[in-house]
Image (cartoon, helix red, strand yellow):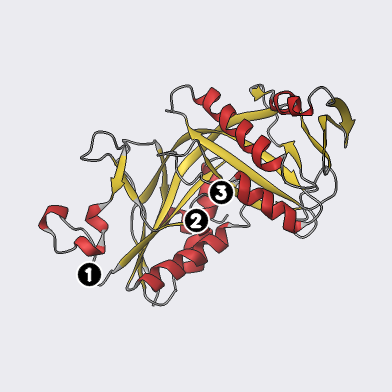
Amino acid sequence: MAALIEDTYAEAFRSIYVEFMITARDRCWVEHAVRAVTGNASSTILCDCEAGLDRYVGPGGDTSVITPDGRPGAIVQLHLPRFVKNRAAALERAALVRISQNVLTCPTAACFNLIDAETYYKLGRKIAFFGDGFQQRVERYGRRLWWIPTLGGEFVLDRRFGYADGLMGGNLWYFGETVDAALDAAAAGVAAIEPIDGVITTFPGGVAGSGSKAGSRYSFSIASTYEKFCPALRENPEAKSELPDGVNSVMEIIMNGRDQGAIERATRAAILASQNHPGLLRISAGNYGGRLGKNQIHLREVLQQQI
């Protein structure tokens, strides 16, 4: 029996983001770079950005995308909400730190910008100072790059990295009879999202087991556990539980992407891949009545779309 798809919507909000491609000698070293550059970036509640893998490209990945150097590659996005103070400078800092410390340092890696925009960061020049005067401007693959000599050989990256408007906060909630049912269904949803162009999931394995609400009773915290949906608080009158009968675990997928269309495609793919999972009772989404963001992804509507 298929899970109930609630007549509700996910509430997304605007972001700014950078998008770049990492290539390396083989898929193994691409994966090492991806894991490093997207680490500690699940949520901007306490992280410097939200980062994740879009998809693997080139040899061994999505072969419709040709990497500049013909090697295996991966596309990565870093997002910050538009409501963050000094967001452009903060995103530049996050990209500078992550590319210089986690891509430059990865054996055989190279890094290429994927956003051509009037708004950009001169990240290549800043990272090139690591060359200590031996760095050079070069042209390869029809691109203007910085070349940095390294102990392992060399590191090249684009001179400019553009940034653009994106979207954060698309989400799906999985209500299961058991922890295993909720988690396995959510994992199936994440697997369906992985090949979708332009979307990332930022939490461990793409799933948040500690979905939060905005605000807290503590003044120093901007988010806290969503007590109304915690199974362990079902009988606690202070929690005012709204948990459906029979639900003993709730898992959440959170999606960021280039635009609403990309998140809608990912939402549809995830629902279709997971709605018949044993023990999954319903699929829902989180929203705050429009107080957090103006972009609404209606679950039942996206299922009707021919995407």
The residue at the point 46 percent across, 70 percent down is 184
Of labels 2 and 1, earlier in sequence is: 2
The Cα atoms of the two marked residues, 2 and 3, are separated by 12 Å
The Cα atoms of the two marked residues, 1 and 3, are separated by 32 Å
Of labels 1 and 3, earlier in sequence is: 3
Q: Which residue is mark 1?
A: 245
Q: Residues within 10 Å of mark 3 (few under 14, many from 20)?
A: many
Is there a contact, CB below 8 Å, between mark 2 and mark 1? no
Report x, y in % for residue 222. Answer: 31, 37
**Label 2 secondary element:** helix
- Above/below status of 246 relative to 11: below
Q: Which residue is mark 2?
A: 204
Residues 21 and 102: in front is: 102
What amino acid is at disc 2? Pro
**Label 3 secondary element:** strand
Q: Residues within 10 Å of mark 2 (few under 14, many from 20)?
A: few
What amino acid is at disc 3? Ile
Report x, y in % for residue 106. Answer: 72, 46
The Cα atoms of the two marked residues, 2 and 1, are separated by 28 Å
Is there a contact, CB below 8 Å, between mark 1 and mark 3? no
Q: Which residue is mark 3?
A: 200
Report x, y in % for residue 97. Answer: 61, 33
**Label 1 secondary element:** loop
Residues 113 and 107: in front is: 107
Left/right placement of residue 289 relative to residue 163 reads: left
- Above/below status of 160 relative to 53: above
Closest to the camera, between mark 2 and mark 1, is: 2
What amino acid is at disc 1? Asp
Q: Residues within 10 Å of mark 1 (few under 14, many from 20)?
A: few
The quadrant of the picture occupied by the C terminus is bottom right
The residue at the point 43 percent across, 53 percent down is 301
